[in-house]
Image (tube, rainbow, N blue to C red):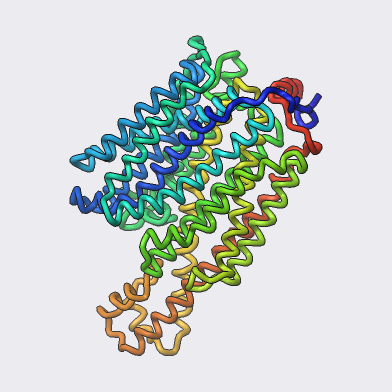
């Protein structure tokens, strides 16, 4: 019987949700920590007397540690045992929170986030493996869905709680929350089914080095496209290669190393040795389609989460707390939808839900492109974000569930590591590419509009570096023009031009995202098409994969 038609016994004994509470809070712990870092940057700069770029390295260090180590972390969990290693890394995460709270220099903070990232690299696959160990059938689908909703809940609560604490108390108390969460989750691990590791498993160090270096280079490359230059090296680049920016070089080398990783892994598998990650979990077209769809979903979410806060905080000059309120409809909708979408799994196939959800995200992005204005509090804009959140929340849960239910239980850790790698890369790609695209379009639009504007003479335009144009508020633009020969009338014309071009760029960005969302229907059309009331049995799916 194939994986797509294998009925699953839904009458099996239901387990207590107590273990899942701990796993849900573990996802909250990681996501809250990530969301709290940007809120804390201002306080770190003030406390330690360091530039913002140094303080922001905490975010970079965390992300790189997770991305580089997640596949190795999955193999460690299989070797040592998921419950035991889960408890160990929770202690490490608690230690990282203590370093954040009692830090005396920025080095303490960076070290704390390095530890947190290393711990998260094991927690990410551990969550999937422990869900597979503790739940079956409909309960497993609901448990997987809760991980998606936990990310949205964490981002929302981190901005609201962290923003309030950061404004009225300070940035350090924010990490008392992560410390408390780590302690609570550790206590709840004793409700999990105990599993035994397999000491015979050997970690493939060559594959670990290849994939670690590939992910680090890809992440650094995409994250620094704006700062280092898309092609030509900018002043902010650490070095140049014959005038070429290191960002695209890192991306190319990262892709090459990634391909070498797959070649090495296939050879190791053919030789009968245990690979770093069993890529047979991607052996079927439906499973590869799920990964492609996941990449697009997370990249789109990252692009929106970059675009909206950037516009509200940078262009409008609003506070992070204002931004959290503006994003609340979106985050709340993702949270609710990711939790409730599992109720539709018995009535509709994954393919049907995915195509409908991508239709929602496409329609919402097109709608936003036409209705968005300089005021984010308008009802049409809020409705657009809500509809996008419905599609986003459904997709994040759905494609992850397809991967988990299609793989046998012993490969759940591999699924978790692939999920972690795909999400980290997609987040970096979505944020960086959207940023580079918007800045490029804005620069080209400003240059063209300034040349055609009758009230802005060429000698004035030459005094402003439009080649390096970026999103700035009207007040900041007035400060820049104050150092030029612009008359008050010309300043107002320039401000009006800037406002128009910013909005046009934003609208074009939403239209481009809508196009990407529409194209994503291609991999979505290859997702499984189970009959209603059928959930695939992972054990039979594994057997079917071997016979394909």
Can the viewer see residue 467 in this picture? no
Q: Say which of 418 and 392 sits in front.
A: 392
Can the viewer see residue 141 in this picture? yes
In the image, is 311 to the left or to the right of 293? left
Q: Say which of 33 and 481 sits in front.
A: 33
In the image, is 136 to the left or to the right of 324? right
Residue 342, compared with residue 390, is above or below; it is above
Identify the residue at horizontal 33%, vertical 38% (top origin).
Answer: 113
Q: Quadrant of residue 446?
A: bottom left
Q: Quadrant of the C terminus?
A: top right
Identify the residue at horizontal 63%, vertical 52% (top origin).
Answer: 391
Looking at the image, which residue sits at the far top?
200
Residue 374 lies, in percent from the top left, at 48, 73
Residue 28 lies, in percent from the top left, at 46, 40
Identify the residue at horizontal 47%, vertical 71% (top origin).
Answer: 502
Q: Say which of 380 and 259 sits in front.
A: 380
């Amino acid at each position: 019987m194939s994986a797509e038609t294998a009925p699953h016994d839904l009458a099996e004994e239901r387990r207590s949700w107590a273990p899942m509470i701990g796993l849900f809070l573990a996802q909250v712990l990681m996501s809250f920590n990530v969301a709290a870092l940007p809120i804390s940057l201002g306080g770190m700069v003030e406390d330690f007397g360091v530039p913002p770029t140094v303080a922001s390295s905490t975010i970079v260090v965390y992300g790189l540690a997770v991305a580089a180590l997640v596949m190795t972390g999955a193999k460690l969990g299989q070797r040592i045992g998921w419950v035991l290693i889960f408890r160990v890394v929770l202690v490490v995460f608690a230690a990282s929170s203590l370093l954040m709270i009692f830090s005396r220099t920025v080095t303490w903070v960076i070290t704390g986030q390095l530890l947190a990232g290393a711990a998260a690299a094991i927690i990410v696959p551990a969550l999937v493996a422990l869900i597979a160990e503790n739940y079956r059938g409909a309960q497993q689908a609901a448990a997987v869905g809760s991980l998606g909703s936990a990310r949205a809940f964490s981002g929302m609560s981190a901005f609201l709680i962290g923003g309030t604490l950061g404004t009225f108390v300070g940035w350090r108390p924010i990490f008392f929350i992560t410390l408390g969460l780590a302690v609570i989750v550790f206590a709840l691990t004793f409700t999990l089914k105990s599993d035994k590791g397999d000491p015979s498993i050997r970690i493939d160090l060559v594959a670990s080095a290849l994939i670690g270096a590939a992910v680090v280079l890809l992440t650094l490359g995409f994250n620094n496209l704006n700062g280092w230059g898309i092609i030509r090296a900018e002043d902010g680049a650490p070095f140049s290669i014959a005038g070429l920016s290191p960002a695209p070089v890192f991306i190319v080398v990262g892709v090459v190393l990634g391909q070498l990783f797959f070649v090495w892994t296939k050879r190791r598998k053919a030789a009968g040795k245990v690979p770093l990650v069993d890529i047979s979990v991607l052996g079927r077209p439906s499973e590869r389609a799920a990964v492609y769809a996941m990449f697009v979903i997370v990249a789109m979410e990252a692009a929106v989460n970059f675009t909206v806060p950037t516009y509200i905080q940078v262009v409008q000059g609003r506070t992070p707390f204002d931004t959290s309120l503006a994003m609340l409809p979106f985050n709340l909708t993702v949270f609710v939808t990711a939790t409730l979408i599992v109720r539709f799994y018995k009535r509709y196939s994954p393919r049907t839900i995915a195509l409908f959800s991508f239709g929602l995200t496409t329609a919402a992005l097109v709608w936003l492109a036409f209705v968005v204005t300089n005021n984010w509090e308008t009802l049409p804009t809020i409705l657009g974000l809500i509809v996008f959140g419905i599609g986003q929340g459904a997709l994040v849960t759905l494609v992850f569930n397809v991967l988990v239910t299609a793989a046998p239980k012993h490969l759940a850790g591999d699924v978790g590591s692939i999920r972690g790698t795909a999400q980290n890369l997609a987040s970096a790609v979505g944020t960086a590419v959207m940023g580079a695209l918007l800045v490029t379009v804005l620069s080209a639009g400003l240059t063209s509009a300034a040349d055609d504007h009758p009230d802005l003479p060429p000698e004035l335009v030459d005094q402003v570096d439009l080649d390096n144009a970026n999103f700035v508020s009207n007040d900041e633009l007035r400060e820049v023009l104050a150092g030029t020969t612009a008359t008050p009338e010309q300043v107002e014309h320039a401000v009006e031009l800037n406002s128009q071009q910013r909005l046009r760029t934003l609208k074009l960005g939403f239209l481009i995202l809508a196009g990407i969302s529409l194209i994503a229907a291609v991999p979505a059309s290859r997702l499984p098409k189970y009959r209603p009331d059928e959930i695939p049995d992972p054990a039979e799916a594994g057997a079917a994969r071997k016979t394909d």
